[in-house]
Amino acid sequence: MCGIVGYIGDKPVLPLLINGLKRLEYRGYDSAGVAMIDQDKIWYKKRKGKIAELEVEINGFDLTSSVGLGHTRWATHGEPSEKNAHPHFDTEHKIALVHNGIIENYAQLKETLKAEGHVFASDTDSEVLVHLIAMCYDGDMAFSIRKALQLVRGTFGILVLSTHEPDKLFAARRGSPLVIGIGENETLVASDGSALVEHTRDVIYLEDNEMAVVNKHGAKVRTLQDTKVEKAVEKLPYDLVHLQKGGYPHFMLKEIFEQPETVWDSMRGRLLVEEGNAKLGGLQSCIDRMIHSSRLILTACGTSWHAALIGEYLIEKFAKIPVEVEYASEFRYRDPIISRVDTVLAITQSGETADTLAAVREAKQKGALALGMCNVVGSTIARETHAGVYLHAGPEIGVASTKAFTSQVATLALIALALGRMNQLSAEEGREIAQALKQLPDQIRQILEQASHIEKIAAKFMHHNHALYLGRGFNYPVALEGALKMKEISYIHAEGYPAAEMKHGPIALIDDQMPVIFIAVKDSVYEKVISNIEEVKARGGWVIAVVSEGDKACAKLCDEVIEIPYTIQSLMPVLTVIPFQLLAYYTAVMKGCDVDQPRNLAKSVTVE
Ligand code: G6P
């Protein structure tokens, strides 16, 4: 949610900032801006819309400055517009600031500042920060920023430059991530590593309540209370090639097609096929505590929440430990009853989602074991949890999550298997599950080969305005995920339901204009799903079904079918979701939608 990039070194900064912003654009994309020090003054440009529009705006400016910062915005306070785009400036135009997060007490602060003669140019909460810093300025920028931030309630990741100290950048965080890239005679700051990786892989992660004073030789970090902090330099776990489309027209399609490899990457070295078991290094130290927990609480948002629902079924089935699944946004505020005998597992691709992070903190506060399942290495949730497991799926750039989801489900299956083998699961059952897990990558490949068939179905689907997705058991969360994918990127209104619930409401919607998408694979609820399909057909609905390979009987009943190979019922979601990802993708492309950056969405939701 919003992207920050800054550079200080010897190179001309403008193209570097634009390039960095493009890498961050997936985080927010309603307006953007850059500022830099040019001949003792702050030069800036802002623009509503995408980075490409800002790029056109600055085209032709040949500035030699090598200190600057930029921002791509996802609006919270104030509509997307040029005046609300960052950077923001103090009244005297000597300080420029970009901000991620939300300043909760901005309204009171703004009143006070106005009364003192500060002139505001935007409707944002962020602008108060720069005026506060100007108000606190007494000849030392670092001191003034620290002092200003003491007055602020809320979350921030900020980057500041000033003509007062033109050879430095100042970065501070509380709640919104910032990472510093250490290069040769150049230092960069960004809200995530993707804006740094083409310059350096050596990074320092800022923690909450820390501030860095950055120059071209590196960064000095102190707490906001002014205590020195020694920071370790870490390595970014990916390189530039992971951030490119690799010949695909969109990141989303690339990421869908990467899934045979990414699912395997999540299991590599962890799945013990011969032993019928799994070993997850990051969880080894607390696996006993997990197994003796009174229950596991899985908490997440969005697509990760759908993976959590499947995790519930997997863990209860294999390990016989009671599991509850909660939206992190609800968990954090409803004062949940949790104690030392509970384990809370936060599932999050980005490791930065504000609600999920708050849920982790709540769980820790109440004494529970707090675990994380993240994709982004070094992310806040990965660092704040007691222990955890990485997905190793590589950077996911498409805003709609695809490969992270299948890796989450595969990793949850590994956890369920490991816990199960410590509980009631026999070695033979363990081996059956492990064998099935091992086959998943090839089976995903088989489904991907049907992309052009699914594209043809999308060509008919795109003319509809609504759709129902129905599944049962392990495939009920897949119905939710299929519907979410469709609405996220094609803007077609889609709802997911457990198939049996159809008769309690959604059936009223069915007529010959309503596509109904079923998951009707051969499992223990197959017959029941077939009855549901009959009910829809009897009312004239247009039925698309994901069915088991060779199921002619079901194919006869449906208007369109997509066949998938057989796996055990509990692992089906890893396969059944693939056609839904492709169906959403092709539908959105045909409708001319911006697949990788759908309207109003952001990849990483770091505000409430
Ligand atoms: C946003 C993204 C979704 C994602 C959700 C949770 O809404 O657009 O794709 O599922 O956040 O993100 P997380 O990083 O916590 O998995």
Image (cartoon, grey):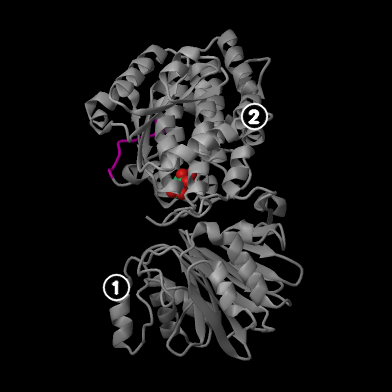
Q: Is residue 387 left or right of residue 260?
A: left
- Work out whether residue 344 can be spotted: no
In this rendering, the answer to whether 87 lies above or below 192 is: below
The residue labelled by disc 2 is 445
Report the quarter where the C terminus lies: bottom left
Residue lying at 33% horizontally and 28% vertically, measured from the top left: 541
Is-magenta flag for residue 340?
yes
What kind of element bears circle 1? helix
Q: Nearer the viewer, mark 1 or mark 2?
A: 2
Residue type beneath disc 2: Arg
Residue 134, compared with residue 443, is above or below; it is below
Specify whether tag 1 is near ligand 1 (CB below 8 Å).
Answer: no
- Tell me which segment is drawn in magenta: 334-344
Q: Is residue 79 visible?
A: yes
Is the stretch drawn in magenta largely helix, strand or loop?
loop
- In this rendering, position of residue 251 left or right of residue 424: right
Name the kind of residue labelled 1 in the image: Ala
Q: Residue at x 38, y 41 (%)?
A: 464
Q: Earlier in the sequence, mark 1 or mark 2?
A: 1
